[in-house]
Image (cartoon, rainbow, N blue to C red):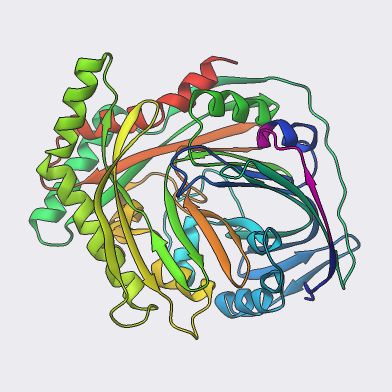
Amino acid sequence: MDLRIKNIKLKKFEYLDPGSCFEEYSDYYYSVLLTGRGQEDIARYSVIGLFPHSIVRYKNNNFSIETEHASRCIKKPFWETLNEILNNTDFDRYDYPVKLCGGIGYLSYEALHEIEKIDKSIADSYSLPVLEWVFYNIYFLFDHRQKEAYKIEINYFHDTKIVKKNRQTEGFSVKNISAECSRAEYVKKVIKIRDYILEGDVYEVNLTHQISGDFSGNAYSLFKKLYAINDAPFSAFLNFGQVKIVSNSPELFLRCFDRKVETRPIKGTIARGKNQKEDRENIAKLLNSEKEQAELFMIIDLLRNDLGKVCKFGTVKVEEAKRLEAYKNVYHLVGIIGGILKKEVSYFDLLKATFPGGSITGCPKIRCVEIIDELETFSRNLYTGTIFIMNKSYFCSSIVIRTSIIKDNKIFINSGGAVTIDSDPEGEYEETVHKVKNIMESLEQQ
């Protein structure tokens, strides 16, 4: 698979909102928007990808590669094949802004079965490839610090361009929304996890449940409504053919540029107050909560260990142990851990060493994954996987939370939280409700 670049055509144009720019392209096949607002250190750039050169998929233990004229299968090991494809790219040869472009896609939570020998026994409520990774003929890059925008046309040595369009009317409708897990059932599962903690199996487990409904109309209309309510820093819209992904994630998973890697787990959540007084009280409660701090520190320690597998000795450091971050309806505690990758380590090696993210599994990770498989009703699929952009020198990825998956006229939304020995079962359920409040509000505005 030849993804080498022959030449590029770079055009600087008047800076504008990335969502407005994407509007006319949102119904094109495999168009994608990665955007968001927030602190500059995590929300400086937005990227649009248009007109796929090639689409890499992994499903049923096989790779397929779709181009303009054909689709072919590859039967090779998962991580080896991804590294081969990455090594056939050369975005890293170019200066800014091209060096911030690359393959865009997702890695499903179910990719954990390509890392650990854990049998999957849980049922699917919908089906997706484990991975889709797309290289584009046209990128738009927006630099929110410099207020600059660029159109980047890529001319690859191997010329192929997939141009399809499925025009959709404006607006959407969602009906028959229901949860697979009642409050009482969720509480019962939290109590079961606390029993596992008392028995010494685990310290902390991330438990989730799923909401679903009937969806019709334009998925990008849902993205716009959700983004207007909460412009989270790792928001994304992926029009991946029969599947539409509407993500409103606040959480950075991994970011790496020229071997410097960082991860920013979110652990610790409290609702925003109804007024300023209640807001201040909630901030103080979160910052002073021993339970919430314990959640965060356990996951920081887990991620330090994960990064230590692939980073140079002595370079892994906790750069910030407890940062308070504000969002439209919740506050979060965030940790920042950094390191320097070993010379021989690729970004897929980094993913393999750290995936799934500790903030959405628990500690210790493998036993937590087994308990998740035992207690959750449906497999997570893309939820708590990662959406990413990658070339050989630049990699940025989010944790897929606060996300809607739309497929076959259905919408699927998951929410969850970390359970520790100090967890209040009713409180844990309420936290899952707060976390998807923005999405549910968007669905009500149809």
137, above or below 92, in the image: above
361, above or below 28, in the image: below
Quarter of the N terminus within the rendering? bottom right
Residue 141 magenta:
no
Q: Position of residue 349 (x, y in %)?
A: 49, 76
Q: Is residue 247 left or right of residue 399?
A: right
Between 341 and 149, which is closer to the camera in this rendering? 149
Q: Which residues are magenta?
A: 9-19
Question: How many numbered marks does the figure carry?
Answer: 0
The residue at the far bottom in this view is: 344
Residue at screen point 46% across, 67% down: 113
Residue 253 figure quarter: bottom left
Question: Does residue 240 appear in the picture of this structure?
Answer: no
Residue 414 figure quarter: top left
Q: Position of residue 207 (x, y in %)?
A: 30, 45
Question: Does residue 114 appear in the picture of this structure?
Answer: yes
